[in-house]
């Protein structure tokens, strides 16, 4: 069980209790806070209140982030490699073809593997325990999960404030005329398909920096640094420029049985001691071999 407390600011005086909490803890829905309030997990000046209670300046708001059981997650052991762990965080090397958290019963997943090994994960979300960011099912490489709720909130905040360092290797089709640059193209959800696309109306700013590391024939090995974290951002940006990632059939890449996109560097501030932790992985052998074949 974790507890968070807030002192109401002048500008938030008159705001509903449930709305105030949803603004303070943005990774939770307003309906979730209504549930917590009705369950007595939220108090104002040490007293229970209704979701519609109008706050006053200097009110003390306390919320208990309750523990939940992970009833819908199948604990299927996969022995995913652990790069680092302590009492607060765990960093893994996610293999390709494994989803981060299951969307239906019986699915093998990163979360299910860790739970099967008796590794404790933050339990704010019963559907996505410990998950503070995600990698696509086909993407491999570094990923961090939170082992308790305070670490979860801290890491989620770091991702939102873009304090986390993320870099990827990508093997793509074609040769770039400029060997270093940025891709500044807004993205939006495609209307009829579960994918993203470049758009200029009701789209979100999306920025990726790239550097060409090596070229051979009609292939380029890139180092990618996403400044924003949109769904499928790297894949869509490169596809739009005519350089789809090898193996990315969804966005126009050639079929290879492996998406050649690798999370190779991950850095964040430790939630407890605030020390900057950084992890790196070398270029996978499959990438080297494919590039050498040309």
Image (cartoon, rainbow, N blue to C red):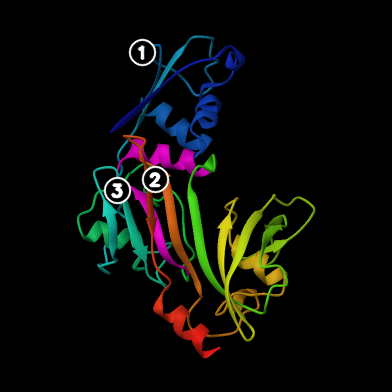
Front residue of 202/91: it is: 91
Per the rendering, the mark at residue 46 is 1
- Secondary structure of the residue carrying tag 1 is loop
Residue 62's place in the image compared with 56, above or below, is below
Sequence-wise, the earlier of marks 1 and 2 is 1
The x and y percentages for residue 198 are 73, 61
Sequence-wise, the earlier of marks 1 and 3 is 1
Residue furthest toward the bottom?
293
The x and y percentages for residue 262 are 47, 68
Q: What's the residue at 54%, 9% (across, down)?
A: 57
In the picture, which quadrant includes the N terminus?
A: top left
Q: What's the residue at 46%, 57% (across, down)?
A: 134
Mark 2 nearby-residue class (10 Å; few <14, some 14–19, many ≥20): many
The answer to whether any part of residue 129 appears in the image is no
The x and y percentages for residue 240 are 72, 69
Q: Is residue 48 left or right of residue 22?
A: left
Q: Nearer the viewer, mark 3 or mark 2?
A: 3
Front residue of 88/190: it is: 88
Q: Is residue 292 left or right of residue 274?
A: right
Q: Nearer the viewer, mark 1 or mark 3?
A: 3
Per the rendering, the mark at residue 213 is none
In the rendered structure, which segment of residues is drawn in magenta? Answer: 139-159
Residue 55's place in the image compared with 109, above or below, is above
Residue furthest toward the left?
118
Q: Is residue 160 magenta?
A: no
In the picture of the structure, the residue carrying the numbered disc 3 is 121
Residue furthest toward the right?
201
Q: What's the residue at 31%, 31% (across, down)?
A: 2
Residue 78's place in the image compared with 253, above or below, is above
- Secondary structure of the residue carrying tag 2 is loop
In the picture of the structure, the residue carrying the numbered disc 2 is 125
């Amino acid at each position: 069980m974790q507890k968070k407390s807030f002192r109401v600011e002048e500008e938030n005086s008159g705001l509903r209790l449930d709305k105030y909490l949803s603004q303070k803890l943005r990774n939770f829905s307003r309906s979730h806070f209504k549930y917590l309030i009705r369950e007595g997990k939220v108090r104002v000046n040490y007293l229970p209140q209704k979701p519609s209670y109008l706050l006053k300046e200097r009110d003390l708001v306390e919320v208990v982030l309750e523990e939940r059981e992970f009833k819908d997650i199948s604990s299927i052991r996969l022995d995913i490699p652990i790069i680092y762990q302590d009492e607060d965080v765990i960093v893994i090397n996610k293999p390709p073809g494994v989803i981060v958290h299951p969307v239906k019963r019986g699915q093998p997943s990163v979360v299910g593997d860790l739970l099967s090994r008796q590794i404790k994960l933050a339990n704010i979300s019963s559907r996505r325990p410990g998950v503070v960011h995600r990698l696509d099912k086909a993407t491999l490489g570094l990923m961090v999960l939170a082992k308790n709720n305070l670490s979860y909130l801290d890491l989620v905040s770091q991702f939102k404030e873009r304090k986390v360092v993320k870099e990827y290797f990508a093997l793509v089709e074609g040769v770039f005329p400029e060997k270093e640059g940025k891709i500044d193209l807004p993205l939006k959800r495609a209307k009829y398909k579960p994918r993203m696309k470049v758009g200029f109306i009701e789209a979100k700013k999306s920025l990726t920096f790239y550097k060409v590391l090596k070229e051979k024939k009609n292939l380029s090995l890139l180092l990618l640094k996403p400044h924003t974290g949109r769904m499928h951002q790297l894949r869509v940006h490169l596809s739009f420029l005519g350089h789809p990632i090898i193996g990315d059939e969804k966005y126009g890449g050639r079929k290879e049985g492996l998406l050649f996109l690798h999370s190779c560097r991950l850095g964040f501030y430790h939630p407890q001691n605030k020390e900057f932790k950084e992890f790196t992985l070398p270029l996978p052998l499959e990438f080297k071999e494919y590039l050498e074949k040309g």
